[in-house]
Amino acid sequence: MMPRAVLFAPAVALVLALTAAHAQSPPLHVVVLATVPSVAQQPAAALPQALRGNALYWRVLRSPNAVSYQLCLGFFQTRDQAEGAKRQLAASFPDARVIQVDAQERANLQKATRAAAAAPAPSAPPEATPRAPVAAPVVAPVAPPRRSSPAPVEAPPALAEAPAGSPEALMAEGRGAIVREDYAAAVRAFTRLLALPENTLTRDAQEFLALSYERRGDTGRAKSEYENYLQRYPDGEDSVRVRQRLASLATAAPQGEPLRAPVEAKPGLRSFTVGSFSQFYYRGNSKIDSQQTVANTPDRVTLSLTDQSSLITALDLSTRFSDDTHDNRIVFRDVNSRNYLEGQKNANLLNSAYYEYKYKPADLSARVGRQPSYGGGILGRFDGLLLGYGLAPRTRLNVVAGTPVEQGFTIDSTRRFYGASAELGPFDQHWTGNVYVLQQSVDSISDRQVAGTELRYFSQQGFFASLVDYDTLFHHLNIGTFQGNWTAPWKTTFNVLLDYRMSPLLQTTTAVIGEPTTSIQTLLNFYTEDELRARARALTAQTALALAGLTHPVTRVWQVGADVQVSRVSHTDGTNNFPATPGSGYITTVTGQAIATGLFAVRDISVAALSRVSADTYSGLAARITSRAPFGPYWTLDGALFWYGQDNDDGSTLQRISPVARLSYVWRNSMTLEAEFGIERTVARSAFAEEITLRRFFSLGYRWDF
């Protein structure tokens, strides 16, 4: 095999020759083979013969909080040439990507190479020379199968340095924060990067910002940023990956699971604490001016009142300490509402308070305490124990037991459940899913008894996910859903959603609605088990929804889209203690929208939509315009205008208009200050009455990410 010195001689010679001949050449392109946090050991890779005439070098990326290194291959005059080299290296470097650099980087590399050649030879033996590993970065797709290591190649000692605060430096800072699992720092870095003018890393930064929010447990913001990504970049292999993650969040997949293979952690104990603390004050004032005409005589009444005055405090805390064998995590999430209006009570909602332990060698996990649903037939929060075991590389078994926790629904009965599930896949690199069974009791009888399955498929063109949940106690389908997204070769994206479910979910407990007692044990003195289930079924409605839509990019800035949604809620029969409720009939909504990205400022998103609503007893027209525009690295302005008009079959009408503005400021990269103000004006008219309601509302608060 050719000696390494001979292998790199053409590369160095080529760099020198090209630099001398093209000192003022236009921007160049290089292939980034890997990004690593340190230069520690020899990379394992072999260049194809056709690429051995190019320069292989390290570039350093510095930021105030991190330093990392990129192994690069260059220099290419056009992006197409660089993309061709990337394809040749895909087997050894599946995570390679192409970036643009200026000609000065090539000149700097030439200067560093000459200086290294003129320096005295080191006295240390070659084995002591530090070399850098090529580790799969955080952004790698699902890890490829292990290969036997090819012959290593050695990079020159020269480093090309990216300027501090540059997109490359901020990207390295954010990736390093993800590796350290410091997601607050990652959010800050990627937010600063996205505030810069559009560049070759903007697209990646948008995805990583969403991923950082997801891994820190902020599902709402993660969804928002993933949706922003798809609005800006609706097509491409990365977009498929983002749709996959967004679909996983929508189907209540476990939070924080890596979308791509993480960097292998360093040995030793690692610990960190991340979270957020926020406080927001909400206030609303309404003025109601009503007039009724009785016997041709108008009667006008004006009423002013404060309808909202509350302080919402939220704490999200996650502490983790782990090593190569053990992983421990403590999570606490709580929301407290303090109401200042007379007659309104304070409330506290404990969302999560659990301890989780993982034993990595056996792929064994345990979680105990109040925790969010993990799927498996559990569709809400619960207090209990969840155990998991990796039975095989593509099979994971889970068992769970506990008590359901439902907000706003308390009964004088004891409910308990236990269940089991199996996570399966991936198969053929596309298919995943699970099967589950669950048994729930209330007092001394069965409450729920379900069996179900989820099936998911992902490919470069799109995805679909489905869920079937069948209640074997009521002998009825509880939930049936299907959602899918597909991008055609001409870049039109089609989406579909079919959703059928019982509302509320089928359970014997529903029978307490309208009864003088909320104790199932007491009701058993008057009804049999079958009668209680019949009463529960009589109080349960069926909801159905079907949606089909598409979006298509017209230009780099504009996308257009349209969708049709049909929904229906069935009637309920009611009981002798609770009246029947009528069904909604079919409600059809047709929506057209236009989406613009980068229309007024870098990274802004503007949406204009118009909807037509048709129902059995009314028809309506709705319009909305929303815009989100970051100004610099710290300020963001959100504006929205909503309008709705409705004509009822009885001749009455309703019109509502509401402008809203929100301004946020990021202070010291961790504190977000936010203020929102809005007005809502509603006019309802009938043959004999008119009511005009003017509501003003605002909120003011802060969020500290640590």
Image: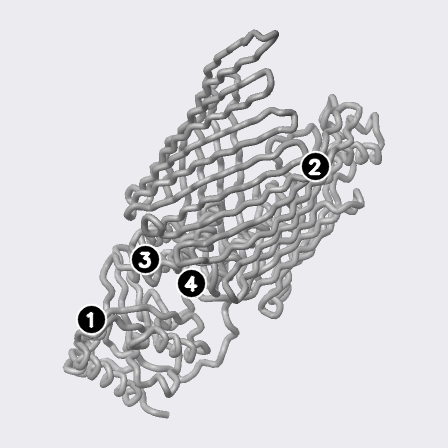
Q: What residue appears at the point 46 percent right and 26 percent down from the top-left corner?
A: 681
Q: Quadrant of the C terminus?
A: top left
Q: What type is the residue that disc 2 sits on?
A: Gly
Q: What type is the residue that disc 1 sits on?
A: Gln
- Left-right relation of 252 to 173: right
Which picture quadrant has residue 36? bottom left
Q: Which residue is mark 3?
A: 198
Q: Quadrant of the N terminus?
A: bottom left
Q: Nearer the viewer, residue 659 or 579?
A: 659
Q: Which residue is mark 4?
A: 138
Q: Which residue is mark 2?
A: 585
Q: Residues within 10 Å of mark 1 (few under 14, many from 20)?
A: some
Q: Is residue 216 visible?
A: no
Which picture quadrant has residue 545? top right
Q: Residues within 10 Å of mark 4 (few under 14, many from 20)?
A: many
Instruction: Calculate the distance from the C-alpha at mark 3 to the C-alpha at mark 4.
Output: 22 Å
